[in-house]
Amino acid sequence: MSTAGRSPEPCFSDQLEGWLSSDGPKTIGALNDVFAEKSFAVAILLLMLLPALPLPTGGVTHVFEVIAVLLAAQMILGRQTIWLPERFRDRSLGGLATDSVLPRVMRWVRLVERISRPRAAWLFDQGWVLRLLGLVLVAFAVAAALAPPFSGLDTLPALGAVGVCLAIITADALILVAGLVIGTGGILLIVTVGAALAHFVTRIV
């Protein structure tokens, strides 16, 4: 069948911006209909974007991180579609479409799209790889949630989770390596700072 005159498939950033800017519901449950098999990666990406921004959140993103853990656990189990309790499934992500957040989100996503291309794309077709990445995403989301409020230490593990999700979406193993390095470095930083604080407290006591 001829493909002449057929419009090229829109890139992920255009799909994402169009969805966030549309009048439709911006809920996690709606992602299945828009992004199909990549809905888990897209959902976790959106959930972890706010804690990944260099902004003081004071723990207000913990609900997003909990939902990200639930979704990543379903990746580990090999689910193909998102399942969440109704209160989480219908939770709005509309805050990402605000004038202050959306430009940052699109800038990050488009930067990754410019430098990415399919590298070892076959990896992302393997069920065991996606299950393993689900385990990694659980670790990054938990680390971001456990970081002390207003410390900014949640940024790196959350950014690592964003990188892993973008790697799945773009099928780029190089982006995956970058996400793993950033997220692992963030966990090590949290552990190091936590150990130093614990040592300081015990000396005072």
Image (cartoon, rainbow, N blue to C red):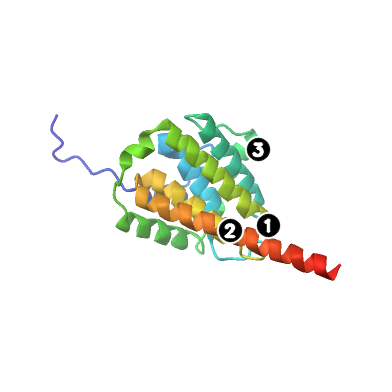
Q: Residues within 10 Å of mark 3 (few under 14, many from 20)?
A: few
Judged left or right of residue 105, residue 55 is right
Count all numbered tags in the image, as a single digit: 3
Which quadrant holds residue 57? Answer: bottom right
Between label 1 and label 2, give the one nearer the viewer. Answer: 2
Q: Residue furthest bottom?
A: 204
Check contact, mark 1 vs mark 3: CB within 8 A. Answer: no
Q: Is residue 52 visible?
A: yes
Among the two numbered marks 2 and 3 on one chain, the one whose residue lies closer to the N terminus: 3
Q: Which mark is residue 87?
A: 3
Q: Which residue is mark 2?
A: 188
Whole-Å distance between the Cαs marked 1 and 3? 19 Å
Question: Which residue type carries mark 2?
Answer: Leu
Question: Which residue type carries mark 1?
Answer: Gly
Label 1 element class: loop
Question: Which residue type carries mark 3?
Answer: Arg
Q: Position of residue 7 (x, y in %)?
A: 22, 43
Q: Which residue is mark 1?
A: 59
Q: Residues within 10 Å of mark 2 (few under 14, many from 20)?
A: some
